[in-house]
Image (spheres, rainbow, N blue to C red):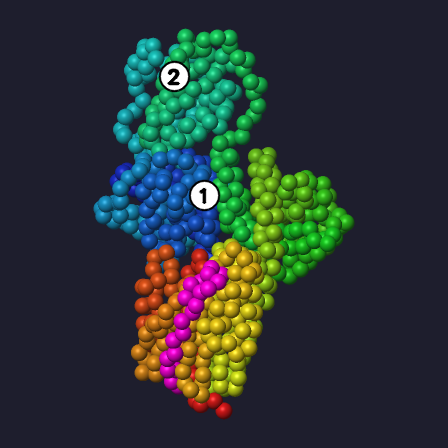
Amino acid sequence: MTEGPDLGRRLLDHLLVEAVRDLGAHAAGVYVLPPGEDVLTLEVMTGVPAHFAEPWHRISLAYPVPVTDAIRSRDLVWVASHEELARRYPRAALVLPYHFALAGAPILHRERVVGALLLLWPGPRHDLVPAVRAGIASVCAFLGHVLAAAEQTGQPLAPRSAARTLADPAADDGKAPDDAAARYAERLPEPGVALDLDGRVTFITGAAAGLVGASERRLLGAPPWEVLPWLNDPVYEDRYRAALISRRPTSFTARRPDGVVLCFELFPDGTGISVRITHAPGTVDGEAAGPAQPAPPQVAPVRVGALYHLMHLAGALSEAAGADDVVRLVADTVLPAFGAQALAMLVTEGGRLRIVGYHGYPPETMDLFDGTPLTSPTPGVRALTEGTAGFFSSREELEQVFPARGDRTDGMAAWAFLPLIASGRPVGTCVLAFQRPHPFAPEERAAMTSLAGLMAQALDRARLYDTEHALAQSLQTGLLPHTLPVVPGLEVAARYLPATHGMDIGGDFYDLIRLDDTTVAAVIGDVQGHNVAAAALMGQVRTAIHAHATAGAAPDEVLARTNRLLIDLDPGLFTSCLYARIDLAARNVRVATAGHLPPLLRRPDGVTSVVQVEPGVLLGIDPAATYPTRTLPLPAGAVLALFTDGLIETPDHPLDAGMTRLAHDMGKSPLSLPALAETLTAPVRAVDDRIDDVALLLLRPSAAPA
């Protein structure tokens, strides 16, 4: 049965090559999604080396890139330019700063996702024409059949540690290597080199070999930067990557060890890169005017692919807010990148290692390790206290160094214990775990160690954010009313939704004040700003209004006295406020407003309208301000709605349109007040990135008060 996966891969490769040719793309890749898993694995690439996609060799379905978005939406995702990529997928754009367009499409079989197709074109480009879109759909349908057939025969295309690279379809053009062409190139005085898609030298003229100072035999079959140390520079490799991915000519200059400066011009196509080498402009036989500068000492540079991989992960971690975000982003990016199956993030608290988040472990396993004393001889503690990462490729290796750990198994077979140190201060330990023995190559150890520093900084920031967030929530909860008074003959419902940006703290407030057996005051307001100062001022405003209201002041006097108090306090912030005094015996309401939105009134027959009230100026501006009052009937069954602008105003919907929508929703068939409150706040609750707080207070007189 060994023919199964090999046959499946041959069919897959054939379809991919044909798709690139027929769709006019220059590169493509196929991701597979094994049944029951939530990680895509790159199976094969063509047109560019598979290692270019190393940051995305394994991708969690939760991670935002075009192929995962295509799977979530079950539709094609088109990115027409690098500029659009930067707007929609900034992490990917950071790692691939080249000009190209791409499409991601889901591969389905009988409505089940089995993989994804990635296609690249030299960019920027306009939108895909219908014929190309239809072609992509057809290719995905065929690929779905191939991947499903491989599963059904018991020979699925299992994920590999590295993706395969196919020869570019443009290379199969019927032209055989021609000795005459090589002799022709040798006769030309201009030095030339040919590279394949993996950067290996496939042809070099004698003049070019002489110019770079190495024999043709040494150069053939090897990337130039492996043979010539002075070309082993991330900048030069980046130009090579740029030529392949964007399919545009690029160039760079490099200095030989003897000081001669050479210009390298790269001309790419689907089969590889042709390189023209000349002396750099402004030099005489490559030698600059003036004394030659000594060549810097050669060191082994980091490969540009590794640099971009770390940039990719750093970009993801920079978006983390709280500790939960850090754990989620590490799970979505780091685990797939290294093929790990589980992680645990631990921090130092009170002389112990406390688990702040984990992924891939059962809770009962984490309970065994939570609270480990910093005096315990464990790999996590040692990594933190000594500041040195610990790598154990098997359980035997771990138990040789830590024999006592055999009593506390976590079910894994290999581990990396990474110290999390931020600004020289130990923060905690990150544990990456593997279900099978896993040898750690030197490059992988270096990448993990570098990444640990990024995770430490992200986790340190996240813990500070979590502390501030908890403080803000506590402050907000303390300033808003915990419960509203029960008033016979009056139904009440209130909702408060904080903005989702910042510390979840703001200046929106509401209150219900019982004045006597048949009279209540309803208050709603909005203090300028979304910070602790705004929340503190909101507390002062609520206290002042409560004091003046219970002292028997009329609505206009309540606002006028509060206004003068704020001017005396001089907080530097302004406040809008609406005060409504409801007389349940007289069945009316007196309303005054200080620059706040007017309320809505739904009559018992369902007709809803805006209550027109002449507004006074905002509180805290003019000490002589007055606040006109309007009295209107409030019969049993009518609903009075007080709210802040966060309920109706968004960047896409101005206040007028929001007010119209709210009045329409409020005028629907009669609902209980809690159900109506949920209906009115549903549009803003569905928004993940609310930029303003939302407060809503609904009041409905019912039967005559007892």
Between discs 2 and 1, the one toward the N terminus = 1
Q: CA distance from mark 2 to mark 1?
A: 34 Å
In the shown orientation, is residue 549 left or right of residue 657? right
Give the residue displayed 46% in from the left and 74% down from the top.
555
Q: Is residue 145 magenta?
A: no
x, y percentage for residue 281?
Answer: 38, 14
In the rendered image of this protein, does residue 192 appear above or below residue 351? above
Hey, what amino acid is under mark 2? Answer: Ile
Q: Furthest-front residue in view?
A: 624
For image coordinates 43% across by 44% down, the residue present is 90
Residue projecting furthest to the right? 375
Q: Nearer the viewer, residue 539 or 234?
A: 539
Question: Which residue is rendered at x = 34% and y = 44% of the image?
Answer: 79
* Foreground residue among 479 and 90: 479
Residue type at numbered disc 1 = Arg
Question: Disc 2 designates what residue?
Answer: 277
Residue nearest the viewer, comparing 580 with 166:
580
- Depth check: 531 or 174 in front? 531
Q: What residue is disc 1 on?
A: 91
Q: Confirm whether residue 665 shows in the render.
A: no
Q: Is residue 567 above or below residue 589?
A: above
Q: Residue 600: where, in percent of width, then height?
A: 37, 73
Q: Which residue is rendered at x = 56% and y = 69% of the image?
A: 543
Boundaries of the magenta span: 616-636
Residue 536 numbered tag: none
Q: Main secondary structure of the magenta part?
A: loop
Q: Is residue 33 visible?
A: yes
Q: Is residue 138 left or right of residue 617?
A: left
